[in-house]
Image (cartoon, rainbow, N blue to C red):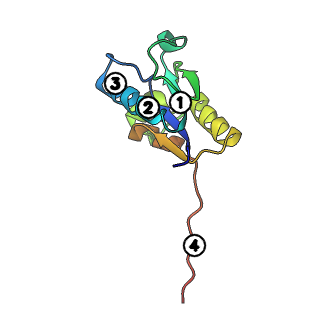
Amino acid sequence: MRRLRLLWVTPNLPLRGVTAARERWWSLLSRIARRHDVTLLAFVDAEDATVDGGLPAGLAAVHRIVKRPWVPDDPLALLPSTVRGGFSDPALAAAVAERLAAEPFDVVQYEYTEMAHLMPRSPVPLTASA
């Protein structure tokens, strides 16, 4: 089996013993990193910006984007409140775009539906009719 290049985008660092979601990411990444090249891009609170201990072993790279107070210009309230309150930070979107432009990944995993808006838009496939 060939090693895949994976980008894993999480709204927090994957650490054990903090929350169930972070424990789940830690467990998944620790297993996947044994067989594949995993780059982690995590949206972190200020206190997690310098945490190195406790991350899953074997990650190819770790990129941290520090959360900052952010309120988007959304006068019609089109963004869901869970996205609007934190995951719409342009620094996070820029970091994802930068990683995707810098390296060819085989798979990109976005954790949480609130992070789905970070996915690059793809053209609608066209099909030929007979």
Number of residues whose C-alpha sits closer than 10 Å to that of mark 4, classed few (under 14), some (14–19) or many (20 or more): few
Q: Residue 70 at x, y = what percent?
A: 52, 23
Q: What residue type is labelled 4?
A: Leu
How far apart marks 3 and 2 lie (CA) works out to: 10 Å
Mark 1 lies on a secondary structure that is strand
Q: Mark 1 points at which residue?
A: 40
Q: Mark 3 points at which residue?
A: 23
Nearer to me, 39 or 129: 39
Vertical order, 23 against 6 (above or below): above
Number of residues whose C-alpha sits closer than 10 Å to that of mark 3, classed few (under 14), some (14–19) or many (20 or more): some
How far apart marks 3 and 4 lie (CA) works out to: 41 Å
Nearer to me, 88 or 16: 16
In the picture as drawn, the residue positioned furthest to the left comes out as: 20
Report the mark closest to the observer, 4 or 2: 2
Q: Is residue 29 shown to the viewer in this render? A: yes
Q: Which amino acid does label 1 sit on?
A: Leu
Q: Mark 4 points at which residue?
A: 126
Q: Earlier in the sequence, mark 3 or mark 1?
A: 3
Q: Which of marks 3 and 2 is nearer the N terminus?
A: 3
Task: Residue 103: give its label.
Answer: none
Number of residues whose C-alpha sits closer than 10 Å to that of mark 1, classed few (under 14), some (14–19) or many (20 or more): many
Q: Residue 31 at x, y = what percent?
A: 41, 33
Left or right of 33: which side holds 62? right
Q: Mark 2 points at which residue?
A: 29
How far apart marks 1 and 4 lie (CA) works out to: 33 Å
